[in-house]
Amino acid sequence: NGGAVDWKSARQSIFATSSAEAEYIAAFDASKEAIWVIKFISGLGVVPTIKEPISMHYDNTGAIAIANESGITK
């Protein structure tokens, strides 16, 4: 239905050198959480296996630019 599934405010364990990098790290952590939630829900067997791609919405253009660069390994 488009509602938020998870959110949090926490200190990052990795030192970021810019706000864009900090946002990118947060987006990466959020995507790991989304994958865990999908695996958890699928593992319950209540719903069929979820095959749709995960939709992630970000509002930081710097983080999006970092994510779209080729060769990013973080």
Image (tube, rainbow, N blue to C red):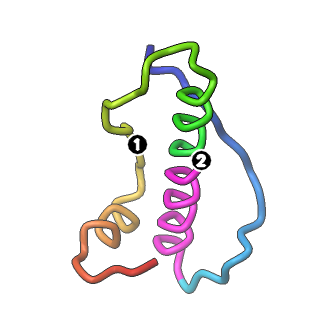
Q: Residues within 10 Å of mark 1 (few under 14, many from 20)?
A: few
Comes first in the chain, label 2 or label 1: 2
Residue 52's quadrant in the figure?
top left
Query: Residue 54 location, x and y as percent?
Result: 38, 39
Q: Residues within 10 Å of mark 2 (few under 14, many from 20)?
A: some
Q: Residue at x 53, y 28 (%)?
A: 42
Name which quarter of the figure residue 50 lies in. top left
Mark on residue 33? 2
**Label 2 vs label 1, nearer the camera:** 2
Tell me where the magenta segment starts and ends, as one range.
18-32
| Residue type, label 2 | Glu
Q: Total marks drawn?
A: 2
Mark drawn on residue 13 = none
Give, as a three-letter code, the residue at label 1: Met
Magenta-colored stretch includes residue 43: no
> Residue 49, relative to residue 36: is it above or below?
above
Residue 49, position as x, y percentages in the image? 42, 26
Viewport quadrant of the N terminus: top left
Which label is found at residue 56?
A: 1
